[in-house]
Amino acid sequence: MGRSTFDGPILVGDNRYGPQRNLGSVYLNQFASLNFANSVAGTAQYSGGSGQFVDANTLPNTNASIITPGGNTASPVFVTPTADAATAMYRGCVFYIPKGSIIDRMDFDVTTVLGSTGGATPAYAAYISNTFATSAGVYASVSLTNTAGTRTGATFTAAQYPAAQSTLADVNVNGQLPLSQIVVTFAFTAASGTLSAPTGIVGVSLKYTLQDQNLWSLTTYPYGAL
């Protein structure tokens, strides 16, 4: 199977000009599959480990570097996820999307029930932010339904919803346009007792729309004159 890559935004329609333009933006998707029991870097469904998240937009999954939002990659400042502790463990993945995108939705598919290899029974949540987060993220939060074969959608608070309508410019790559860094943090926590290594398999689907910065312009191509 071949593939094509090209810059956006992508607009689709057969009536570009005139009062009844029917142009629409393309719905985009990135996906991560994480097996929390798999701690072998560079393998399918690798989920990272204590203090290490995953770049899931590579095949196979590899270790990711979380950059302090707004930092330039010529001299980046990195964020290190909190290391495993007796009552809290964090795993996660990093997506990169064009800045100013709209996060339409995020879905979490539990294919194998989440748990730990022993000890206390954890509670489960996921936080969607532009950096490592251990509570409500910038963009959305999720109370995971921990049942095999279930899908849980992200929810947006009144504060998160406007942020999800135009993602921030977090990573400035020399010679390229800034990117939005979307970090999904899975929290395994217990009120008491000691947690052991996490288990379970989750698929994360990030669905977003790349905004056209010329939208609503009366004079700028392709909405208006050339």
Image (tube, rainbow, N blue to C red):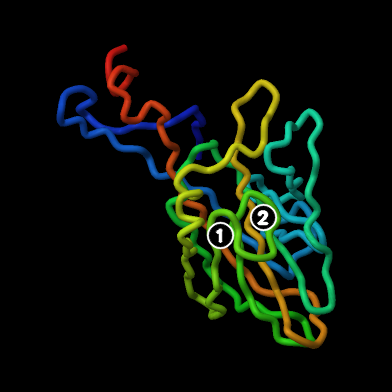
User: Residue 121, how many percent across, how many down?
Assistant: 71, 86
User: Residue 201, how many percent across, how many down?
Assistant: 63, 69
Residue occupying image coordinates x 70% and y 74%: 188
Mark 2 nearby-residue class (10 Å; few <14, some 14–19, many ≥20): many
Q: Earlier in the sequence, mark 2 or mark 1?
A: 2
Front one among 119 and 35: 119
- Vertical order, 74 against 154 (above or below): above
112 relative to 131 in the view: left or right: left
34 relative to 2 in the view: left or right: right
49 relative to 1 in the view: left or right: right
Q: Quadrant of residue 87?
A: bottom right
Front one among 70 and 145: 70
Q: Quadrant of the C terminus?
A: top left
Q: Amino acid at mark 1?
A: Val
Residue occupying image coordinates x 25% and y 32%: 13
Instruction: Residue under label 2, please give it.
Output: 93
Instruction: Residue under label 1, please give it.
Output: 204
Q: Secondary structure at mark 1?
A: strand
How many marks are shown on the rendered structure? 2
Asked if the residue at tag 1 contacts the one at tag 2, i.e. Cβ–Cβ closer than 8 Å, the answer is: yes
Q: Secondary structure at mark 2?
A: strand
- Vertical order, 200 against 213 (above or below): below
User: Residue 30, how many percent across, how many down?
Assistant: 53, 49
Front one among 195 and 56: 195
Residue occupying image coordinates x 32% and y 24%: 217
Residue most extreme to the left? 19
Mark 1 nearby-residue class (10 Å; few <14, some 14–19, many ≥20): many
Front one among 175 and 199: 175
Give the spatial CA distance, label 2 vs label 1: 9 Å
User: Residue 77, how many percent across, how many down?
Assistant: 80, 40
